[in-house]
Every structure is written in C-alpha cells, then in structure tokens.
C-alpha cells in the first residue's frame, strides 16, 4: 500500500483560482485604466464648477475635459451622515511613495508630474494594441461623479468625490 503525503508546495483544488476569476483579468485591467485616467484628473475635477465644492480652488481644465463637464451625471454630494473630506486634507495627506515617503511629500513634489499629454498604452493579448491619448480614450464615455470612501490600512479614511467613467 502506497500512501502519498502531499508536500507543502502542492496546491489543493480549493486553492486554485476559479477560471471565471482568472478570465476576468481584462476587467481588472480595464478598472486599472479607469483608475489611471482618474489620477490624471484631480487638478481639473470640479474646475468648471468650483462653487460645487467651496474649498476647491478653480484650476484650468484642458478644453477636451471641460467640454465633457456640462454633461456629467452629478451625484448628490451628501453621503449618508458623512461629510466630504476637505480638499486640502485629501490632497495634502497621502502616501504616493513615488513622490516621497512622508505624508506631505506628494503635495510638495507632485507638481513635477507631467499630466499633459497623458496617454494609455494597451498591449498584450488584445484586439487593438496601441498608444491612445487620454482624451481619445475618454471620448465615447459620459463622465459621472461618485462619492467614495477610501480606507487606509494606517487607520485613516477619506470621503471624496470622483469624476470618471465606468469601463464595463
């Protein structure tokens, strides 16, 4: 009689990622692209309608973005009993380590990030690989505003408005 003991490196059937999740990696990629697109927008978001958020200084939005703002689906600003995090807190207390390790470093150093022109590269096993300008990528979509609650593992959270488009 042969008794085979599994080694610690052997996967059990229950440990294997289901095929449906594995195949949905394109959804993950699309969501990542949407997130990337949003990172290029913070300076412009709300620029055409500064009175919407009283503590946001108006900025100069690129024409292609400002043209899309009037058709944006605006969500009610109030989120249950939570107030929107003040703009200064949301933009001056974060940990984008690409700009420094201190919580205030991104606010000081992010000004050097070139956000125009911004392009998205799509490659790999896709039907239409290429480099696309952000404005061309966004052209077919209507912008919408959502209110998100961001939670950090360092025990802080923020309630912030987000302007973008769903890719689904």
Image: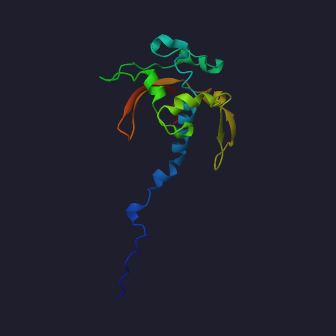
Q: Could you tell me how many numbered marks the image carries? A: 0
Q: Where, by quadrant of the figure, is residue 66 drawn?
A: top right
Tell me which residue sits at (45%, 15%) in the image: 55
- Vertical order, 117 against 96 (above or below): above
| Display colour scheme | rainbow
**Looking at the image, which residue sits at the far bottom?**
1
Q: In this view, does 102 lie to the left or right of 138?
A: left
Tell me which residue sits at (35%, 83%) in the image: 3
**Looking at the image, which residue sits at the far top?**
51
**Looking at the image, which residue sits at the far left?**
81
Tell me which residue sits at (43%, 70%) in the image: 10
Tell me which residue sits at (55%, 28%) in the image: 108
Quadrant where the N terminus is found in the figure: bottom left
Which of the two residues, 31 or 90, is positioned nearer the viewer here? 90
Q: Where, by quadrant of the figure, is residue 152 drawn?
A: top left
Residue 88 image point, x, y percent: 46, 22
Residue 4 image point, x, y percent: 38, 81
Q: Is residue 67 visible?
A: no
Which of the two residues, 81 or 133, is positioned nearer the viewer here? 81
- Vertical order, 17 against 1 (above or below): above
Which of the two residues, 1 or 50, is positioned nearer the viewer here? 50
Q: Can residue 60 be seen in this view?
A: yes
Residue 63 image point, x, y percent: 65, 17
Residue 134 image point, x, y percent: 64, 30
Q: Is residue 44 left or right of residue 127?
A: left
């Amino acid at each position: 009689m042969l008794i085979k003991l599994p080694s610690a490196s052997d996967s059990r059937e229950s440990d294997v990622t289901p095929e449906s999740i594995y195949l949905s990696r394109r959804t993950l990629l699309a969501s990542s692209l949407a997130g990337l697109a949003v990172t290029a927008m913070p300076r412009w978001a709300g620029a055409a309608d500064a009175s919407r958020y009283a503590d946001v200084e108006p900025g100069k939005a690129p024409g292609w973005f400002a043209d899309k703002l009037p058709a944006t689906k605006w969500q009610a600003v109030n989120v249950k009993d939570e107030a929107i995090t003040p703009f200064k807190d949301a933009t001056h207390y974060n940990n984008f380590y690409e700009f420094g390790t201190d919580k205030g470093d991104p606010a000081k150093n992010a000004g050097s990030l070139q956000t125009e022109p911004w392009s998205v590269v799509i490659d790999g096993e896709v039907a239409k690989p290429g480099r696309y300008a952000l404005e061309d990528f966004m052209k077919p979509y209507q912008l919408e505003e959502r209110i998100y609650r961001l939670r950090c593992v360092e025990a802080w959270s923020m309630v912030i408005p987000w302007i973008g488009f769903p890719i689904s």
